[in-house]
Image: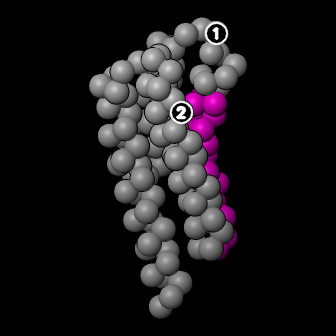
């Protein structure tokens, strides 16, 4: 579920990126896309690892990338590339992803402490 929701976030980010100023192609746009894509990639890589501790490590990286996405979106508002209403659907999708990642991390913590 976390992987699917993060894939949806990537889709939303790519649609949003089309609206950003073209002169930001190699700056904000590139960073936003890389951070978004990093989320499902790290979930997938972690799931393919042999241990729960490795999986958890990659989930933490995915969560860090999610924070990057959030910060870049905040920058887009700060720099007047959009208003906060425009990024609301992205923020809502981010929150879903964060809740799922946190739940996965907690479940792995509980599994390893038992």
Label 2 to label 1: alpha-carbon separation: 16 Å
Whole-percent x and y of residue 65? Answer: 58, 46
Please indicate, yes or no, whether residue 47 appears anywhere in the rendered image: no
Whole-percent x and y of residue 30? Answer: 65, 25
Please indicate, yes or no, whether residue 76 appears anywhere in the rendered image: yes
Disc 1 is placed on an element classified as helix
Whole-percent x and y of residue 102? Answer: 43, 62
The tag earlier along the polypeptide, 2 or 1, is 1
Whole-percent x and y of residue 26? Answer: 69, 19
Q: Residue furthest right?
A: 26
Crowd tier of the residue under label 1, counting other residues whose Cα lies within 10 Å: few below 14, some 14–19, many 20 or above = few
Disc 2 is placed on an element classified as helix
Q: Please name the residue shown 37% across and 38% down the image.
A: 91
Q: Please name the residue shown 53% across and 84% down the image.
A: 112
The count of marks equals: 2
Read off the residue under disc 1: 23
Of residues 91 and 48, the one nearer the viewer is 91
Q: Please name the residue shown 62% across and 15% down the image.
A: 24
Main secondary structure of the magenta stretch: helix
Q: Residue furthest bottom?
A: 114
Read off the residue under disc 2: 72
* For residue 113, above or below residue 105: below
Membership of 65 in magenta stretch: no
The span picked out in magenta is: 31-51
Q: Please name the residue shown 56% across and 42% down the image.
A: 68
């Amino acid at each position: 579920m976390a992987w699917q929701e993060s894939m949806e976030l990537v889709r939303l980010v790519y649609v949003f990126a089309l609206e950003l100023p073209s002169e930001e192609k190699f700056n904000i746009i590139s960073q936003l896309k890389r951070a978004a894509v990093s989320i499902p990639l790290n979930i997938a890589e972690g799931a393919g690892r042999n241990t729960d501790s490795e999986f958890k490590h990659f989930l933490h990286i995915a969560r860090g990338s999610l924070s990057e996405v959030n910060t870049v979106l905040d920058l887009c508002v700060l720099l007047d590339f959009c208003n906060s209403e425009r990024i609301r659907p992205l923020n809502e999708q981010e929150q879903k992803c964060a809740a799922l990642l946190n739940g996965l991390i907690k479940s792995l913590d509980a599994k390893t402490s038992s």
